[in-house]
Amino acid sequence: MSSTIKHRRVRVLLPLSIGDVYDYRAPDSLNVEIGHFVTVPLGRREVTGVVWEEAVNSDLAEDRMKDIIGVLPCEKLPPESLKFIDWVAQYTMQQRGRVLRMAMSVPDALYPKAPRIGYRFTGEMPEKLTSARRRVLDVVSDGGAHTATDLAAIAGVSTSVIKGLADKGALEAVDLPAETPLQPADWQHAAFDLSPDQLTAAKALISSVADDSFHVALLEGVTGSGKTEVYFEAIAACLKEGRQALVLLPEIALTAQWLSRFEDRFGAQPVEWHSDLSQSIRRRNWRAVIEGRADIVVGARSALFLPFAKLGLIVVDEEHETSFKQDEGVPYNARDMAVVRGKIGGCPVVLASATPSLESLINARSGKYEHLQLPSRYGGAALPDVNIIDLKQHKLGSQRWISDPLREAMEETLSKGQQVMLFLNRRGYAPLTLCDTCGHRLQCPHCSAWLVEHRLMKRLQCHHCGFTTGLPKSCSECGAEDSFKACGPGIERLVEEAEALFPGRRIAMMASDTISSPRAAAEFVAAMDRGEIEILIGTQIVAKGYHFPNLTLVGIVDADLGLAGGDLRAAERTYQLLSQVTGRAGRESIAGKVYLQSYLPEHPVIEAIARQEGEAFFKLEAEGRESAGMPPYGRLAALILSSANAESVASFATELARQAPMGEKIAVLGPAPAPLSMIRGRHRYRFLIKCTKDVHIQSVLGKWLQGRKVPNNIRLQIDIDPYNFM
């Protein structure tokens, strides 16, 4: 068949969940190259894809071939992006088109934006000069040009006033750049004074950037040791070499203080990438990345799939954070994929954390990663004193969550004009609402999860599917009216208690419900810095990254929360979270104190926090994982089956189990109903596949599922290296 081919053929990958590459003719007139974004016919419609490779062995009949319609006016997808998408798809066992879709997340960016129309003063004054017209002319009197919308907003008039002045000849239309230009960062702007430990670590990172080759460094430093300032020097070295740098942050709300420190160092803001950006800004930033104009990008995990033209450095800050793991869509861990992206692009990767993941620690101690350590806080600030409050001895009493020792410490701290933070990793008012008459619990109709009361919103909410409803007047089980009561504390309830204990004090709440954008976080940080907040009550969003100079007391209301997580990382996650929380106290010259309320003061996690012996905890954790053959000493994968039909999914799970792989190095656990057996109206069953590190788990799964047709009403999801066991 190949001998009859008269025209060049290429394979095009489309950002679709089904299918793979498709063969198309590449007309000579289009000058098609690998990586080009192209428009192609697919059935009766036209779709956009990427030229992936030459179709040298295409056996499709000539009369069935279709031509590429056109090449889009955009830079090519870089070769490193093509390789990265291939690698991620193979590793996660997902369709390549689904991974490509993450790299093509802004379709409008594939086309150049039309120039904007601006208006400037001609020097001619209109015969009739109203106050509105005068305000407009005052704005343009400096000779600058503005769009009609911007000019109207500045002058406080309608756009019709601008158009009227143009009609009278007082303003003339001019072409403006299509988008607001990006301000370049200056690597020489204002370097920070580094401590000897910081300087040693910074020199090592600068050296790896100068080598321009793949290298991974774990930057481990206690809270307040100045890890950010250290990797800023690596970014400066990257800029000096004319390459791009990427910084991944786990919580986009963390960017508030980070951006301020960045601007102090580099004299400009970086390019941002996260879901809170407007579509027009995302479009501009995506195009700036692929054209190489975005020199530094800071963003959420999805920024890893941006089409960098000349990536020279990747930094993963708070690398231990579980929010780097994506569970929906294509399941991947951005920390691990960042290392892969660095290897493909031949650039260094920095993993930074005060409490590194066990995986990264073991890689560093085995010599796979370079291990850079900052053992003390910057400027001589001391780590806080940690005190354990045994709740078996200090009884809380009915409907109380702040113990007497914690209350007394709060009173003393507030009397000195210092700030207090109370930490409880539970949103809302109460985690459970039940009928006081019959005990009926209010459950989400779409999930096997209890509804959480959010009293400030006057709503009950499911934190898994987002379902909300009002509090029922009567119980659906027994008919009793006004019988529902809240059980257990959420931070709204903690605010209520703090207001009763400390009347007149300025109390504020910080959670993902209330801080949903970098702007909101910046306003909150500014209020803390101005001393407008005396008692801060928050969830895990306050635990990391923030620097509040006058915050000297941290109270952890329920230190045990999370220890019963039911998965292999429950203890590790709890230790990391509590360490990060305690690290908010006493970050300047005034010594800090931490009080942990616990019913389990003898638990290894609580003891490690109290004694500040992270090394001992991680040694114990590593021994337990190794003896059980669990990651990072073994491999895990999960198969999740879901369907709206409970009987159908249970039957298919049983059928699949009959053909499950067996062997000395492989164990298949399940099928079993997932702990959250229903989410969004879909019933869920799980398999957990466990094997030794030398087993290629993707091959095992591939052989197991090969040729097996999944019923149309069942969804099968594969999660390699799962973090979520619910």
Image (spheres, grey):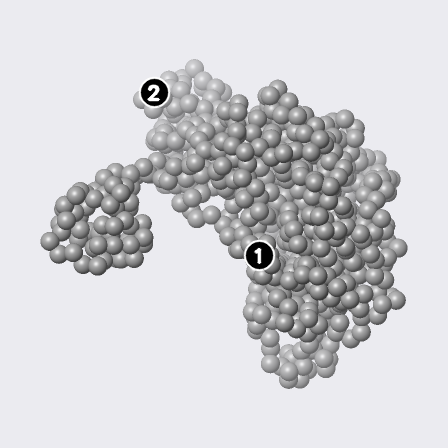
Q: Residue at x 81, y 50 (%)?
A: 609
Mark 2: which amino acid?
Asp
Work out whether mark 2 precedes mark 1 in sequence or the reverse, and give the earlier one. Answer: 2
Element assignment for label 2: helix
Q: Which residue is mark 1?
A: 530
In front here: 494 or 532?
532
Residue 19 screen position, x and y as percent: 51, 37
Residue 293's x, y, as percent? 44, 31
- Label 2 or label 1, whichever lies nearer to me, is 1
Left or right? Give the position of 599 relative to 41.
right
Q: Secondary structure at mark 1?
A: loop
Q: Position of residue 14 (x, y in %)?
A: 46, 36
Q: Is residue 629 above or below residue 464?
A: above
For the N terminus, give its image quadrant: top left
Work out how far the residue at label 2 is from the one at label 1, CA to CA, in angstroms.
Answer: 65 Å
User: Along the line of sight, which residue is nearer the eye, 542 or 701?
Assistant: 542
Q: Nearer the viewer, residue 98 or 335?
A: 335
Q: Which residue is mark 2?
A: 28
- Callout 1, which amino acid? Arg
Total numbered circles: 2
Query: What residue is at 51 percent from the left and 42 percent from the top?
Result: 273
Q: Is residue 44 above or below residue 212?
A: below
Residue at the limit of the structure toward the top, as seen here: 3
